[in-house]
Amino acid sequence: MAGDPVTGREPAGAHGEPSVASGEPAEAHGEPPGGPVGALGEALSVVAAGPAGGRPRRRVELEPDTVERDLVKLVLTVVELLRQLMERQALRRFDTGDLTEDQEERIGLTLMLLDDRMTELRERYGLRPEDLNLDLGPLGPLLPRG
């Protein structure tokens, strides 16, 4: 049997290896050798192992029970990044005197309301502010500490 065209390895379940579910060869159940479960298992074992000789990589948790929370965490991370960028831009504009007093008031109120809403959403999903700060490895954290 030919190996996988991408990895060059024989698929799991080839050569009559036991099926995960029954212990019988995958072919006995009409499953293709190394079917989707075998391929997924191989891919996840490679991810879990991490780079050769290095520490394991941090990986995405694929838990059905936490999908909503994880999605909210990702969205709130992006919104928090944009909120901080808008806040810095507003401070620069305040410092340069580009804004009228009315504009300063509106921007300040809008940023405070956005911060309050972010706090509400974090609390609803049990997230802390530091949970929204992604570790970018050698680049450091996504959001400035502060």
Image (cartoon, helix red, strand yellow):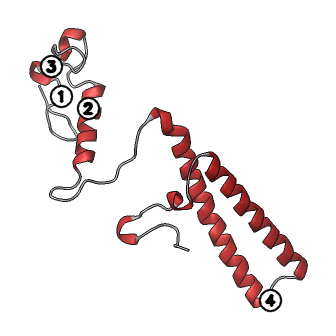
Give the CA distance from mark 4 to mark 3.
73 Å
Q: Residue at x 51, y 62 (%)?
A: 130
Q: Position of residue 80 (x, y in %)?
A: 61, 62
The amino acid on which the numbered mark 4 sits, given as a three-letter code, is Gly
Q: Which mark is residue 12?
A: 1
Q: Mark 4 — residue?
A: 97
Q: Work out which residue is located at the far right of the displayed protein and give it.
A: 102
Give the CA distance from mark 4 to mark 1.
66 Å
Q: Earlier in the sequence, mark 3 or mark 2?
A: 3
Q: Are marks 2 and 1 in contact (CB under 8 Å)?
A: yes
What is the quadrant of the C terminus in the image?
bottom right
In the displayed structure, does residue 53 sit left or right of residue 84?
Answer: left
Q: Position of residue 88 (x, y in %)?
A: 66, 77
Q: Work out which residue is located at the far bottom of the displayed protein and give it.
A: 96
Q: Are marks 4 and 3 in contact (CB under 8 Å)?
A: no
Q: Earlier in the sequence, mark 2 or mark 4?
A: 2
Q: Nearer the viewer, mark 3 or mark 2?
A: 3
Q: Are marks 3 and 2 in contact (CB under 8 Å)?
A: no
Q: What secondary structure is found at the residue carrying circle 4?
A: loop
Q: Mark 2 — residue?
A: 39
Q: Earlier in the sequence, mark 3 or mark 1?
A: 1
The amino acid on which the numbered mark 1 sits, given as a three-letter code, is Ala
Q: Position of residue 66 (x, y in %)?
A: 49, 38
Characterize the local packing of mark 4: few (<14), some (14-19) or many (20 or more) Cα atoms within 10 angstroms.
Answer: few
Give the CA distance from mark 2 to mark 1.
7 Å
Q: Are marks 3 and 1 in contact (CB under 8 Å)?
A: no
Characterize the local packing of mark 3: few (<14), some (14-19) or many (20 or more) Cα atoms within 10 angstroms.
Answer: some
Characterize the local packing of mark 2: few (<14), some (14-19) or many (20 or more) Cα atoms within 10 angstroms.
Answer: some
